[in-house]
Amino acid sequence: MKRLCPNGHTYSGAKCSECRKAPQRSDNNYDHKWNMLSKRYRAIHPLCEDCEKRGRTTPASEVHHIVPITKDPSLRLVWSNLVALCHGCHVQRHRDMGGQK
C-alpha cells in the first residue's frame, strides 16, 4: 500500500526513500533554515497550489520562491514569498520565468 510522507512523496514500506537521500544542493541559500522552513510550509500546504487552482489534487514535493533569491535575497525565508508545488509545476514556473532560479 502506498503512503504519502510529510514531504509529499509517495512510498511503500517503513520509510520514505526520497527523504532519506542526502540533499543535492550545496548552495548556501538552501541550508538548514531553508530545509526546516520548506518542510513546515509543505506540512501546512500539502497539495500543489498550482494544481489546486486547476481542480487537481497533487501532493506538493517542492517549495518555490515567487521572487527569486537572485533578485531579492532578503525574501529567501519570507513565508509570503513561497508557494508549494509538485515537481512538474515547479519546472513550469521556472520555464515561465525564463529559467531564473
Image (cartoon, rainbow, N blue to C red):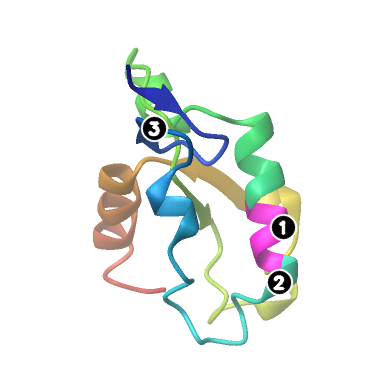
Vertical placement of residue 84 versus 59, above or below: below
Rendered image quadrant of residue 101: bottom left
What residue appears at the point 64 percent right and 62 percent down from the top-left corner? Answer: 35
Vertical placement of residue 67 versus 31, above or below: above
According to the image, label 2 marks what residue? 32
Of residues 41 and 83, the one nearer the viewer is 41
Q: Badges 2 and 1: C-beta atoms under 8 Å apart?
A: yes
According to the image, label 3 marks what residue? 13
Rendered image quadrant of residue 31: bottom right
Residue 94 placement (x, y as % from top left):
32, 61
Of residues 71 and 43, the one nearer the viewer is 43
Position of the N terminus by quadrant? top left
Lower position in the chain sequence, tag 3 or tag 1: 3
Residue 43 placement (x, y as % from top left):
65, 34
Rendered image quadrant of residue 97: bottom left
User: Bounds of the magenta span?
Assistant: 34-38
Q: Is residue 74 left or right of residue 55?
A: right
How many other residues sit within 10 Å of disc 1, few (<14), some (14-19) or many (≥20)? few
- Amino acid type of disc 1? Met
- Amino acid type of disc 3? Gly
Residue 41 is covered by the magenta coloring: no
Q: Pick out the residue farthest to the top.
A: 55
Residue 45 placement (x, y as % from top left):
60, 31
What residue appears at the point 37 percent right and 17 percent down from the top-left corner? Answer: 57
According to the image, label 1 marks what residue? 36
Lower position in the chain sequence, tag 2 or tag 3: 3
Residue 35 is covered by the magenta coloring: yes
